[in-house]
């Protein structure tokens, strides 16, 4: 039997299923999880989506958003669900340390585990690993999964809205990471009446005044540009977090603004959080920030979008980045 036939056989009888995704869930983590959950519910499975930490509220339009179990808020219940699950899906992450303490429960669980992911170098903790780094998003892979299971007829607007959300957020509305299958998936979802304009509106036009004020502060006061090396960096201090009342998710997308500059190829967004300094890296074209993140900031991700963290003083992390800058690319001569 092929892998997909084995999975299909596992899905034949209804059972307790847990779907997990990574901490600080983004549109792809939430969208792929909820999309798959709706499919499995149609197959009469008892499904729980568990995420380690809270979701940005602009995704509250997604069907099933309210039913997601947040580990940070309901630890005992989440542990129990994982321990009782017969089948565990791990979506949009490649290593158990991306799901905090839940990782141990997954590791020791007797359940069959299926990873569906598009990050480099998946850790072999699951029985089935559907990993494809050429996919735009895990949500796109969920579309392929449904198709490969021969269940395309079950695809509906509800499932489609979730999957479409993940594709949109991981490709910046089809600006990067796409392949022809990305558009095939989008076309199939549109054909199922997915409200693509409404979804884009929910995702991108849902900012509060404080978000634009914070963006203005970052661009006006916190941005360093290393023009000759095609790099730029923005940082936020703990004091900024207080002054702008920054909550989880409020800084989403700020890193991308630096790449809007013509000659900037690498952007770093460095945040002084309560116990760690968090780093977000983005790049254009061939520049691989995944390597920079894993070598210098204990992180990883994708070639053009990675992240990491450091237990160090903010100033030291900023200096570490400044020292790396000359090595990224040859100086740009105008
Ligand atoms: P972001 O900058 O939006 O937090 O993350 C961008 C990408 O980098 C995500 O897709 C995620 O997979 C990856 N990433 C972010 N933070 C970390 C981290 O601390 N460790 C690893 N391995 N990957 C990360
Ligand atoms: Mn993703």
Image (spheres, helix red, strand yellow):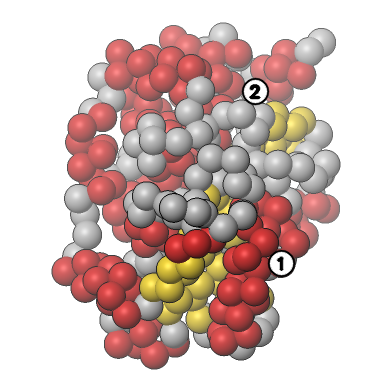
Which image quadrant is residue 212 in?
bottom left
Which mark lies nearer to you, 2 or 1?
1
Quadrant showing the N terminus: top right
Q: Regarding mark 1 in the picture, which secondary structure is present there? A: helix
Task: Left or right? Give the position of 141 relative to 153.
Answer: right
Residue tagged 2: 11
Task: Left or right? Give the position of 71 relative to 240.
Answer: right
Residue 296 numbered mark, or none: 1
- Pick whichever of labels 2 and 1 is earlier in the sequence: 2
Q: Is residue 241 visible?
A: yes
Where does residue 175 sit, x and y in percent of width and height? 39, 35
Pick the residue in front: 73 or 185: 185
Residue 155 numbered mark, or none: none
Q: Is residue 325 above or below residue 151?
A: below
Q: Residue at x 67, y 81 (%)?
A: 311
State the CA–CA distance, disc 2 to disc 1.
42 Å
Task: Left or right? Give the position of 245 relative to 212.
Answer: right
Local packing at callout 1 (Cα closer than 10 Å; few below 14, some 14-19, many 20+) is: some
Q: How many marks?
A: 2
Q: Is residue 260 above or below residue 276?
A: above
Asked if disc 1 is less than 8 Å from ligand 1, the answer is no
Badge 2 vs badge 1, beta-carbon distance below 8 Å: no
Q: Residue at x 70, y 53 (%)?
A: 291
Where does residue 25 sit, x and y in percent of width and height? 49, 54
Q: What residue occupies the far left of the structure in this picture?
A: 209
Local packing at callout 2 (Cα closer than 10 Å; few below 14, some 14-19, many 20+) is: some
Q: Is residue 90 visible?
A: no
Where does residue 263 sit, x and y in percent of width and height? 42, 52
Q: Residue at x 35, y 16 (%)?
A: 187
Where does residue 331 sit, x and y in percent of width and height? 56, 58
């Amino acid at each position: 039997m092929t892998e997909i036939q084995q999975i299909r056989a596992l899905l034949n009888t209804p059972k307790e299923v847990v779907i997990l995704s990574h901490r600080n869930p983004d549109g792809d983590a939430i969208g792929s999880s909820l999309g798959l959950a709706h499919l499995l519910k149609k197959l009469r499975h008892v499904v729980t989506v568990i995420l380690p930490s809270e979701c940005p509220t602009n995704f509250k339009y997604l069907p099933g958003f309210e039913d997601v179990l947040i580990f940070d808020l309901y630890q005992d219940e989440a542990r129990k669900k994982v321990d009782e699950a017969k089948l565990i899906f791990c979506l949009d992450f490649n290593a158990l340390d991306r799901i905090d303490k839940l990782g141990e429960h997954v590791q020791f669980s007797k359940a069959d585990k299926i990873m569906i992911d598009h990050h480099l170098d998946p850790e072999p903790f699951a029985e089935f690993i559907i990993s494809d780094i050429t996919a735009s998003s895990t949500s796109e892979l969920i579309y392929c999964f449904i198709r490969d299971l021969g269940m395309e007829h079950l695809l509906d607007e509800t499932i489609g809205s979730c999957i479409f959300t993940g594709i949109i957020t991981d490709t910046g509305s089809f600006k990067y990471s796409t392949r022809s299958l990305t558009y095939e998936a989008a076309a199939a979802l549109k054909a199922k009446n997915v409200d693509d304009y409404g979804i884009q509106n929910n995702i991108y036009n849902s900012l509060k005044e404080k978000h634009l004020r914070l963006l203005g502060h970052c661009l006006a006061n916190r941005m360093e540009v290393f023009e000759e090396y095609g790099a730029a960096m923005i940082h936020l201090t703990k004091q900024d977090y207080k002054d702008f009342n920054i909550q989880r998710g409020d800084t989403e997308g700020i890193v991308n603004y630096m790449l809007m500059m013509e000659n900037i190829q690498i952007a770093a967004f460095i945040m002084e959080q309560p116990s760690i300094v968090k780093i977000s890296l983005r790049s254009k074209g061939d520049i691989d920030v995944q390597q920079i993140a894993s070598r210098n900031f204990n992180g990883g991700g994708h070639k053009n979008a990675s992240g990491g963290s450091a237990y160090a003083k903010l100033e030291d992390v900023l200096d570490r980045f400044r020292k790396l800058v000359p090595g990224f690319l040859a100086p740009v001569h105008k």
